[in-house]
Amino acid sequence: MPKRNTFSREFKLEAIRLMEAGDKKPAELARELGVPRNKLYLWREELKAKDSETVFPGSGRRRGQDADLAILKRDNERLREEVEILKKAARYFAREPS
């Protein structure tokens, strides 16, 4: 089964800008960019329907899951560092004063 193409936010915005500029027909532009023509129209409609800052947030449906996983990994690493610091502090205070 062929791999699905993913396009960056910048690519989609530039493709929409080129399509709206009207220098080329959408079918010709789609061929040049290597995307299906209907994707250009879908991207344009999505841009019109949403706020321009929140449109095209990532590379697909998994974006939310990937972002959550990255946050959890960062938190996990921070907590591991805190545990190491507390272990060192416990060893320091457990020593008898000389």
Image (tube, rainbow, N blue to C red):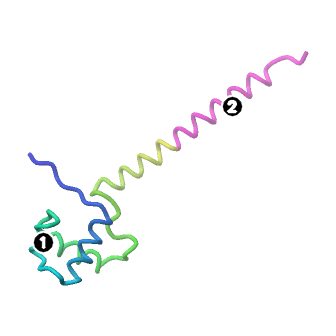
- Relative to 39, say whether 62 is above or below: above
Task: Report the amino acid beneath label 2.
Answer: Leu
Residue, disc 1: 38
Cα distance between the residues tagged 2 and 1? 57 Å
Task: Please check the rendered image and state whether residue 29 is part of the magenta-colored stretch, yes or no.
Answer: no
The N terminus: image quadrant? top left
- The answer to which image quadrant residue 58 occupies is bottom left
Between discs 2 and 1, the one toward the N terminus: 1
Residue at 43 percent across and 47 percent down: it is: 70
Q: Percent x, y for residue 80?
A: 57, 34
The C terminus: image quadrant? top right
Task: Report the amino acid beneath label 1.
Answer: Asn
Residue at 14 percent across and 64 percent down: it is: 35
Q: Residue furthest front?
A: 23
- Extent of the magenta region: 75-98
Residue, disc 2: 86
Task: Please check the rendered image and state whether residue 84 is part of the magenta-colored stretch, yes or no.
Answer: yes
Relative horizontal placement of residue 18, taking residue 37 as reference (left or right): right
Q: Percent x, y for residue 21?
A: 23, 83
Check disc 1: other Cα within 10 Å, few if <14, some if 14-19, many if 20+.
few
Of residues 37 and 46, the one drawn nearer to the viewer in this rendering: 37
Q: Percent x, y for residue 13?
A: 29, 71
Of residues 51 and 96, the one drawn nearer to the viewer in this rendering: 51
Of residues 45 and 93, the one drawn nearer to the viewer in this rendering: 45
Relative horizontal placement of residue 31, taking residue 61 as reference (left or right): left
Dot 1: what SS?
A: helix
- The answer to which image quadrant residue 18 occupies is bottom left
| Callouts 2 and 1 close, C-beta under 8 Å | no
Relative horizontal placement of residue 40, taking residue 65 as reference (left or right): left
